[in-house]
Image (cartoon, rainbow, N blue to C red):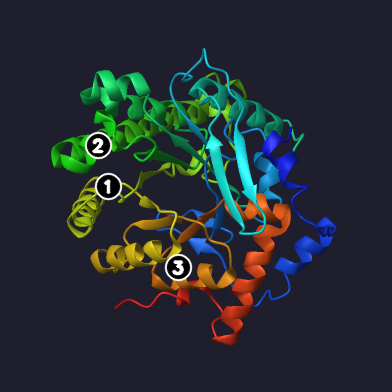
Amino acid sequence: MLSSQIQIITFTRQKFRPIDQCIFALNVQLSIQLQVITKSGYRFNNPIGLGPNFDQKGQGIDCLHQTGLSFVEIGSGTLEQQNPHKLRTKVISIDLKNRDVKQIFQGVTPSLNLIVSNLVRRQTAIRDQKISPVINSIIGVNVQANLDTQRSIPYLTHTDFTKNIRELNDLCDYVVLNLTEDANSNGLSQYYKNEKALEKLISESVKARNSELGKLAALEYELADQDLYRDYTFSLRRYYQRNSMISTLKPMMIFLQISLNYVQDKQKFLATIISKCKIHGIDGIVLQDDSVENTKNLIKKFRELDSNKDLLLITQTKTMTGQQLYDQIKLGADLVQIYDKIVLDGPYATNDLLHELQEIMRLNGLKDVKLLYQKN
């Protein structure tokens, strides 16, 4: 089932092309490799993915992957539906002349139960061979803490995040802990101002992930020993074909999404969060900034502190051209999330960007996206 957002964007392109031409554009230069492989073994078909708040409920995952996106991030969601008594429609303002997209206001934030339900339904369809996902297609879920928790009992905000992780542990390839949605609330601002609060969030999140992984390992061992694979009754039964095959016990990745707009000493905060992420085993950081130039400066600062690329760096900005994509990867970004270009240009946007990126790489004599970044 396609989400309403997908149906809307198909009309924003003045000139349409058949989908086979769209796919052909991506494969023009097969000699140029775009695959990104993480240290934990995840394979992204290319560096481009879809950011959150496009397919909030996870209803169009496979359709979106078919457009060339290597990863689709659904949500953002919370444990409980927010503003349940104020039903609103998501409204997007599109300025085609200036190529600008603004969300006038957001709809009701979906509950985690709704997202989980849609993921389980999709996985059941995969198991029953009713749908065939794109090879190496990556699924992420962007999660927030409940607003009541952030504002009323901020010291328990981390428990909302860990509950989200436990619920999603075997349903997706990565989870993003969103620390930007309401950064002025006490629940989130503490992570930018208080190192102990930040460390507690990071350590407890990794513990929650590892604890659930241990349960899966024990269950898998027991079932394998008894040859009862068809009688799964636990969460293993939900999905045995996701990118991170449970049989390999590859851990679900955890990312932190941050915005440095309200941080005075950006260098110090980046140094702190990078250090704590490395110590406790967080997989990466999502840097959110609307300005492409600001994003480039933040990437530089980030890679000065993490030149060996121990952490994945994902940028979330208004990337609109292949040159902007090339520049961000060259500076040290591993993955780039797009949103505006999908809304403006429709389902061909991803392959257009990839084709531009391949052409720029060809002109610079580069045959692998891994070669773009040069450690200083």
Q: Residue furthest top?
A: 85
Looking at the picture, tell me which residue is in the foreground, 110 or 86.
Answer: 86
Above/below status of 181 relative to 276 = above
What number is the disc on residue 189?
Answer: 2
Q: Are marks 2 and 1 in contact (CB under 8 Å)?
A: yes
Q: Residues within 10 Å of mark 2 (few under 14, many from 20)?
A: many
Looking at the picture, tell me which residue is in the foreground, 142 or 62.
Answer: 142
- Judging from the image, what secondary structure is the residue with disc 3 in? helix
Position of 62 with respect to 297 (left or right) is right
Mark whose residue sits in front, 3 or 2: 2
Residue in the picture at 24% in, 24% down:
154
Q: Are marks 3 and 1 in contact (CB under 8 Å)?
A: no
Q: Residues within 10 Å of mark 3 (few under 14, many from 20)?
A: many
Can residue 234 be seen at all in this image of the molecule? no
What number is the disc on residue 262?
Answer: 1
Residue in the picture at 24% in, 29% down:
186
What number is the disc on residue 328?
Answer: 3
Of the image marks 3 and 2, the number of the one nearer the N terminus: 2
C-alpha separation, residue under disc 2 versus residue under disc 1: 9 Å
Where residue 175 appears, x then y in whole percent? 43, 39
Residue in the picture at 74% in, 38% down:
131
C-alpha separation, residue under disc 3 versus residue under disc 2: 28 Å
What number is the disc on residue 221?
Answer: none
**Hey, what amino acid is under mark 2?**
Ser
- Judging from the image, what secondary structure is the residue with disc 1 in? loop
Position of 49 with respect to 264 (left or right) is right
Quadrant in which the N terminus is drawn: top right
Q: Quadrant of residue 8?
A: top right
Of the image marks 3 and 1, the number of the one nearer the N terminus: 1
